[in-house]
Image (cartoon, rainbow, N blue to C red):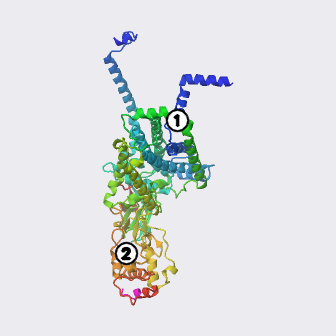
Amino acid sequence: MKNLFKQFVDAFEERTGLVTLVIGIARHPVPPGTGWLYVFGSSVLTCLVIQVVTGIALSTRYVASSGSTYAVLQFITHKAILGNFLRGMHYFGASAMILLIGVHMIQVFLMGCYKYPREFNWVTGVLLLFLVVAMGFTGQLLRWDQDAVWATILAAEMIGRTPFIGKYLARFLLGGKTLGGATLSRFFAFHVFFLATSILAIVAFHLYLVLHDGISAPPVRGQKVNPKTYRAEYDQLLAERGVPFWPDVAWRDAVAAFIVVITIAALAFFVGAPPLGGPPNPSLLASDPRPDWYMLWYFAVLAQLPRHMESVFMIGAPLFAIVFLLMVPVWWNKGERHPARRPWAVIAVITIVLSIVAFWIEGSRSPWSPKFDAQPLSAALVGATGGPVAAGAQLFHDKACEFCHTVNGSGGQRGPDLTYVAHRLTVDDIKIRIANGGGNMPAFAGILTREEMNDLVAFLESRVTEPGVHRPGTAVAGTSTDSAATARTISEAPP
Amino acid sequence: MANEEHGASPREALSPERRVFLGRLSIALSALAAAVVGIPVIGFILGPLLATDKPVWRTVGQVSIFEIGKTVKVTFIDPSPMVWAGVTALTAAWLRRLDAERFEAFAINCAHLGCPVRWLAKAKLFMCPCHGGVYYADGSVAAGPPPRGLFKYPVRVRDGQVEILASAVPIE
């Protein structure tokens, strides 16, 4: 029996050469001392395998039809055996993939692994980064709920700002002039065919290059990359001190892959699939579309831009980013590899990472968005149940002031906190500001009656005042720090 | 001759000119075959760009149900509904009755990036949840990032019914 098996393997090998090929790949020599920093590439590959496998499984139930997909998603999530778990795996697998691509990229950049002769590994990696982000975005839309519909509209509007061809690009994306029956099928095709096959093809090339040029040796201070001598030095290093990839190096990849799989499975099990929002009905407007977490920082960047730069930035910045990243190995493919000798590389990475984190935090707060669910202040906080102050408090909510302004800890953050506005502005100044608006505030002159304006100002004037602070232009009797006394003084001020 | 040295008979050997010709012929035939397959495929994928679907008048209700001075949301079917589109064929507009005869219909899409603007009846403002774009009751910009006022759809009254010209998603 054993003899028969060996005979078969020998015959197979004689006809295909596959056994030698696989053993050669497994045993190919790797420079010594690669260590744990080298596991991130294979971790991304692990995520890719998870995405392909869970994606294929999900596609056996998914129906890409604008009209019925929402019901199908409900079925997969709530009825299908393991459906919620598989959706969770696919979601957290995508999240982990994007995160690990970031880590892999930083590691490769800081250790100078992208330098000669591995420039095309960097270039294919950059293409993969953008393809995977596109995969993430189309994947978010395949979760075809209300927010997905509005995110689609947003994407169409953004791409529609491209000069000359914007309208056509937007129509290409939507599959017509309106969002509808054609839209979801397109995203499905992009997601599972165009993008997925492109990614698989480029990953194959990326891995071929790893074998062709070998895994880069850990950087050494002062050891510069010189394209003329690099190959000879590298071959000598492998000949003298090289270790076989399997199992000397691969065991760390296996450990990392195991951790990745367990983490993703645990998140899918305990957290579950991202929840579905309302139905994908474009006539329902109570939607507050937000990108998934990995694009949230970019949402914040766009929200902070000066108006006149917006269109240029929206189209130009991603193009600039892709071109710049592709040019990295063209400009800096020689010389020092060790980060300690490349301070600007380190500063650049820290700057970019800190900026993204800062915008992330800002994006998760999104203070520029009105807070539509702000509730009217309670009577206890208002401090009055009748009269102008109570009426003003109601107006503060009804006239949408509260959606953008906070008072006593309740309200939006787009405009300044108005709890202590009476310290900063006189009654007349407050009225002028409300009537005329400005910048990010509407002019309320045509919206409020004279009486409403007075009530609103009375409410703002009645807020608790900070001890020891006195409003401008008002003579406050004595130096009393008693807030009640101060409030009384203010309410006696002429209207 | 080089071919004779390799043992090929003169009948099998190709002249250099013939080699060049056959090489080019193979490439040309392959390119032609690729075009025969590729052009219809690209045409099919780009088909939506050439769609000529026109705006369509949609009835949104009797004139009498709309109060003068009020702004309400009206829901109707978009101009190019597919049979399988389900609820995605629906769209909406903010309809404002100006007087006995005249109506205005505003797009629900913010002129900034297309997010769904909400009408706040008490504040008499349209407000966008995404970046805080605000519009007055007449659709003009009140605050925030929108570069222009809300897009308007043509409205008409026919046989006591209000009709809106359902058109493409407003993208400038």
Q: Residue furthest bottom?
A: A478
Query: For residue A459, what is the image quadrant?
Result: bottom left
Q: What residue do we see at 56% from left, 49% from top?
A: A89
Q: How many marks?
A: 2
Pointer 1: what residue?
Answer: A243
Q: Is residue A419 magenta?
A: no
Q: Is residue B113 visible?
A: no
Instruction: Please identify the quadrant where the N terminus of chain B is shown.
Output: top left
- How many residues crowd mark 1 within 10 Å: few (<14), some (14–19), many (20+)? some
Horizontal and vertical percent for residue A113? 43, 42
Q: Is residue A25 visible?
A: yes
Q: Nearer the viewer, residue B23 or B51?
A: B23
Q: Chain of mark 1?
A: A
Judge from the rendering whether residue B119 lies leftward or rightward of residue A257; answer left or right: left
Under tag 2, what secondary structure?
A: loop
What's the amino acid at mark 1? Answer: Val
Query: For residue B62, what is the image quadrant?
Result: bottom left
Pointer 2: what residue?
Answer: A447
Do the residues under discs 2 and 1 have CB atoms within 8 angstroms? no
Give above or below for A426 relative to A79: below
On residue A486, the disc is: none
Residues in magenta? A489-495
Query: For residue A416, what is the image quadrant?
Result: bottom left
Q: Residue furthest right?
A: A1
Q: CA distance from mark 2 to mark 1?
A: 77 Å
Nearer to us of marks 2 and 1 is: 1
Horizontal and vertical percent for residue B104? 36, 65
